[in-house]
Amino acid sequence: MRLIDSLRFARAAAFGTPLRTTLLILSMAIGVAAVVMLTALGDGARRFVMGEFSAIGSNLVIVLPGRSETRGFNPANLVTSTPRDLTVEDAAVLLRVPGVVRIAPLIIGTSEINASGHLREAMLVGTNTDFIAVRHLKLALGRPLARDELGHGSAEVVLGALIREEIFGSESPLGKTVRIGDRRLRVVGVLAAGGQGMGMTTDELLIVPVATAQAMFNTNTLFRILIEARSREQIGQVKTRVLKMITQRHDGEEDVTVITQDAVLQTFDKILRVLTLGVFGIAVISLAVAGILVMNVMLVSVTQRTSEIGLLKALGARAATIRNTFLLEAGLLSLLGACAGLGFGHLGAALLRHFYPSFPAYPPDWAVLAGFVTALATGLVFGVMPANRAARMDAVQALSNR
Amino acid sequence: MSLIELADIARTFQLGDSTVQALRSISLNIATGEYVAIMGPSGSGKSTLLNLLGLLDRPDAGTYRLEGRDVTTLSPEEQARVRSERIGFVFQSFHLVPRLTAHDNIELPMVLAGIAPVERKRRVQQALEEYGLTERARHRPDQLSGGQRQRVAIARATVMHPAVILADEPTGNLDRTTGEEVVRLLEGLNAEGVTLVMVTHDQVLGGRARRQLSMEDGAIVHDSALPG
Ligand SMILES: Nc1ncnc2c1ncn2[C@@H]1O[C@H](COP(=O)(O)OP(=O)(O)OP(=O)(O)O)[C@@H](O)[C@H]1O
Ligand SMILES: [Mg+2]
């Protein structure tokens, strides 16, 4: 039998029972679509986190109070308690470490802002003039906080774009006074809209001098110190030197953790790749289920077409010919299912991207290819048994079956 | 020369504990171009014999020579080839593929044999004309009458130009006039030189054959070609 004729015969056989065929194709398609969608979600999450971490600045080394048990980065470090204060003085001396370009100490809390009859809660960041440069933020109006060498804390504030709009509308806030907590501060700048990073928007931020924030929250300790290294190559050295310097200042006790943006990026990258692989595995199981369905449908088909198989034998079809037509049919159905699944999956991922534009839900190529190949392979593998059953059928008995 | 030579053919079926002797020591020669009717009561082994002749079944004992060649020892592949090229079947229940048109049903044996599409087309057209089915070429079996279905089946049995046509009660599902029409078609083929072996319950139809075999309990009890 010629290949083209086998294909035509298999196609006619497959579409002789449209409902069953459609259901089978659909189940295969759902499996493949699940692979595409889930890996798009997984890899999208990875890209999203990567993007967020890159957005917080470049060549960053971050000091946080509290010692980590393991020396590498550990997500738990982000929420450790504070055994010894990390102070503004600690931050100031770090500027002398070779390879350091800028530093920004950080205190974070919430506070109320009150001005021209508006009252609202906002995230307050106590830091210095370099924060904006370290974090790669942009100003829409005015200037950053004044340089405060002595650490007295000036009565200045830089507003997030949304806060400025809510309180001042289109009016310029520069030079105006706002009330934050029980203090009166002068607005010196406004951040550009749309700043992102570390899972928060900068649009609702209030930036004040670190000393001012310390006084407001009545605390001495810093939440973080952000350090910008001169180049990527120097990150490692800066990290070691910073740790040494602070340990020295803290009476030889290593009670801070220094992490690098690079390490964080790599760790998240690894975690989220494994996650993607995991959801891929789960989706592939649904493909195996679809494969069992293929076997079931093909077995029913063989049973229903028993007398046809007998006839084919009477007409001189070889066992191999009969096996091949049934295998081709299973392959054809799987192929259609896989193609439909790719279509659905890509459509789903595109819809996700449409509704959540900030979430880059692109399925990785390897997952698309592997999903497609797995679908075809399971279809064929599970088609072998029914096809062999058809090929081995006894001609006389098959013919007498009606 | 004999087209078909059977020597001491036996076929038994195992049904649970009991064995059924469907054929007992059948010896039979059929020459090229003969027209043979096989008759006998139900269960006497007529279909079993025809299936053996068509290489759909294997005997438990004895030898079967087709065109001088021992075909009982052939591999399944080789037997399939012989079926494809030398044997045409016509069944009581037509056995058309329901999803295929009359045209495609007639073409099927040639498709299976891997014959080139151009040649297939020519032969199907010719067969459709010969059997008066040109108008029905695009119809599926469920859109055809019983007589038309059997004509499609006969056309299908002949497109490969077989040496012998084996027909198992080809008129069993047809009324008298349609049945006679079908038998006339088969006789026409026989007149062109094709050997025809037909199983029938109908004494009148069977009587039209030049040679009659009567079977009883797995044995040939009467052969009109033999004296006595
Ligand atoms: N596959 C089988 N298994 C068991 N016994 C069988 C099988 N096929 C045929 N037989 C038995 O062999 C005997 C002959 O059967 P066969 O079909 O050849 O009879 P027949 O002459 O064609 O009858 P009918 O006129 O009813 O078609 C019967 O007793 C039947 O029961
Ligand atoms: Mg019978």
Image (cartoon, coloured by chain):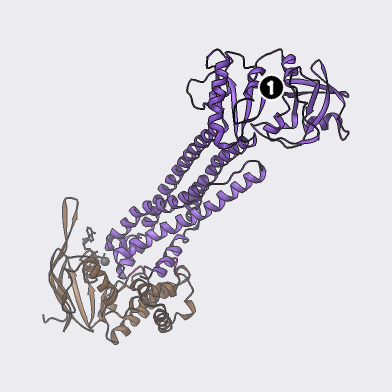
Q: Amino acid at mark 1?
A: Ile
Would you say residue A223 is visible in this rendering? no
- Residue behind mark 1: A108
Nearer the observer, A168 or B62: A168
Q: Position of residue B2 (x, y in %)?
A: 16, 81
User: Which quadrant holds residue A100?
Assistant: top right
Main secondary structure type of the part rendered in magenta: loop
Please tell me whether mark 1 sits on a helix, a strand or a loop.
Answer: strand
Please state, as top left, top right, bottom left or bottom right, where the N terminus of chain A lies in the image: bottom left
* Left or right: A134 as drawn, with respect to B13: right
* The residue stretch that appears in magenta: B92-100
Q: Is residue B8 magenta?
A: no
Nearer the observer, A211 or A98: A98
What tint does the image give chain B?
brown
Is the CB of the residue bearing disc 1 within 8 angstroms of ligand 1? Answer: no
* Left or right: B114 as drawn, with respect to A69: left
Q: Position of residue A266 (x, y in %)?
A: 52, 35
Judging from the image, mark 1 belongs to the subunit labelled: A
Q: Is residue B95 magenta?
A: yes
